Amino acid sequence: MIQTPKKHLAILILPAAAVIFVFAIVPVGWVITHAFMHLDPATGKTAFAGLENFRDLFSDWFFVSSIKTTVKFSLIASFLQVGLGLSLALLFNRKFAGRRFALPVIIYPMMLSTLVASSVWRAWFHYDFGMLNHWLSMAGLPSVKWLFDPKLALYSIILVDVWQWTPMTFLIVLAGLQSIPKDVLEAAVMDNVSPARRTVFVILPMIRGHIFLALLVRSIDTFRLFDKVYALTGGGPGNATETLSMFVYRHGFKFFEVGTASAASIVMLAIACALSLLYATRILKGQHQ
């Protein structure tokens, strides 16, 4: 019996659907269930708690602080990465001496694993023997407590994230620049449009979708930041760098407060979905204009 195309399609989709169900839908359902429960880690018994976990969360100063820290990190890091990526893409979109050798150097940080990059920067941040403070001392400036000053620790992690992931935004924007039809740019040149006006009024509007895509990707990734904080500061000093992910980890895996950690995860998921919807709407809107 010859199968219909719909049956063929179902067979092709089934493995991917099974993976999504097992590794995405089931865990999310488990977290949503436990967000409304009290779990006793000693006995394993659960009791329905309603919205109590969420009420406790928003009355917890550390949770509110972790939201502020996460949003601050995400906004600063993602906009810096997109801004620097755009600048680099505009530079590398034209030919210049050494371009072939400079391009791999620009992309290289993205190829490193996060823990390796964090280990390298942790050595560079070292107060007594770090490279950054060595350069400051050579310039006659005092050493800086990069990871131990509550006012600087978060910005130090932002610096590491910008260094590692600006290449991703650079590649996304560069792909957009190289997709612009040459006749459009040639027409602007023939009309004697200056390079600055050509960039602002011709190039940037045509790659708006790529810019918002880069913002979407980096905003989501920076919002769920965990590994760099864990490797560099552990959420300290104090709670100066404790993000939502660190809050969930601390309550779920150190204090075994599964209900609190699950409720915090739901809040984190809701904020991430709202950000994704906002950027996705802007991207689709740009494509239809």
Image (cartoon, rainbow, N blue to C red):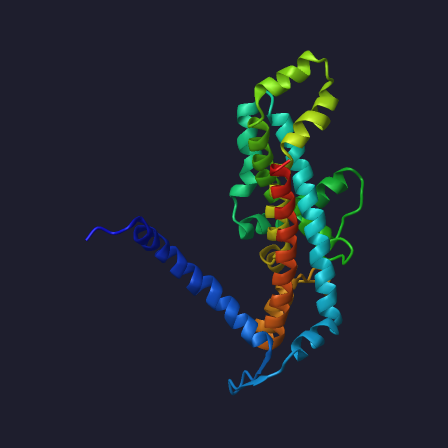
- Name the residue rendered at 61%, 38% in the picture: 288
The quarter holding residue 51 reads bottom right
The quarter holding residue 164 reads top right
Specify whether 148 is left or right of 253.
right
Q: Quadrant of the C terminus?
A: top right
Task: Say which of 3 and 181 sits in front.
Answer: 3
Task: Say which of 191 and 127 sits in front.
Answer: 191
Residue 232, above or below 197: below
Specify whether 15 is left or right of 77.
left
Residue 188, above or below 136: above
Residue 233, above or below 40: above
Specify whether 35 is left or right of 155.
left
Q: Residue furthest left?
A: 1
Q: Position of residue 20 (x, y in %)?
A: 44, 59
The quarter holding residue 179 reads top right
Q: Position of residue 210 (x, y in %)?
A: 60, 37
- Name the residue rendered at 58%, 57% in the picture: 227
Number of numbered tags placed on the structure image: 0
Task: Say which of 226 and 180 sits in front.
Answer: 180
- Name the residue rendered at 59%, 51% in the picture: 118
Q: Position of residue 95 (x, y in %)?
A: 58, 19
Q: Is residue 97 visible?
A: no
Q: Is residue 226 visible?
A: yes
